[in-house]
Image: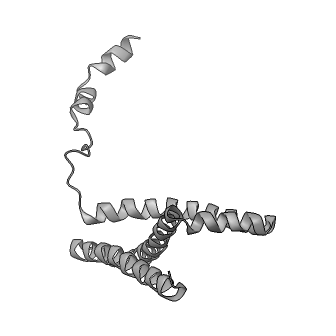
């Protein structure tokens, strides 16, 4: 027991207590690569939700025309279209971020200016590609 008390008063434990804590979100400055990292994880989670929606669509298709009509009705509602648009953004963003990380895996793209530019490009690609896909859908479907 006396050994534990002696260790608690050692200079090493005093230095350990004096070390700074990790920065809190309120004092940490947000930057584009931080947002890109968070968005990559969030889009991955959204894609899991998308897989569940596709599985539900397949199950409703297997259950018969009435179930399928209900599922299509839900997906075609305004809320359903918003969810599908969000999934489209997630697909395109995750694709761009995956390509970005593939370049990182080759050892390139780590300079701050390059990392920032590719992060912005991933967001821009996701936005433009999603809008183009949905504009094409609305133009071709006559909505």
Near-viewer residue (24 or 94): 94
> Could one spot residue 59 in this view of the protein?
no
Of the 4 image quadrants, the one containing the N terminus is: top left
Relative to 68, residue 128 above or below: below
Relative to 84, residue 138 above or below: below
Q: Residue extending furthest top?
A: 2
> Residue 133: x and y, percent?
46, 82
> Residue 134: x and y, percent?
46, 79
Relative to 128, residue 94 above or below: above
> Could one spot residue 45 in this view of the protein?
yes
Q: Residue extending furthest bottom?
A: 140
127 sits to left or right of 70: left
Q: Residue visible at 46% across and 67% down?
A: 86
Near-viewer residue (57 or 30): 57
Query: Based on the displayed image, in which of its 4 quarters is residue 126 positioned?
Result: bottom left
Relative to 123, residue 31 above or below: above
> Residue 41: x and y, percent?
44, 60
Q: Residue visible at 27% across and 32% down?
A: 16
Q: Residue visible at 60% across and 63% down?
A: 74
């Amino acid at each position: 027991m006396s050994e534990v008390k002696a260790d608690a008063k050692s200079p090493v434990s005093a230095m350990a207590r004096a070390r700074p804590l990790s920065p809190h979100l309120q004092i940490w400055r947000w930057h584009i690569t931080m947002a890109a990292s968070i968005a990559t994880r969030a889009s991955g989670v959204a894609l899991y939700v998308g897989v569940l929606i596709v599985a539900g669509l397949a199950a409703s298709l297997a259950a018969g025309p009435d179930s399928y009509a209900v599922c299509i009705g839900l997906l075609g509602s305004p809320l359903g279209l918003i969810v599908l648009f969000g999934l489209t953004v997630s697909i395109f963003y995750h694709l761009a971020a995956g390509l970005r990380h593939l370049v990182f895996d080759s050892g390139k793209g780590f300079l701050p200016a390059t990392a920032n530019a590719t992060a912005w490009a991933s967001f821009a690609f996701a936005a433009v590609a999603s809008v183009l896909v949905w504009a094409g859908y609305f133009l071709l479907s006559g909505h």
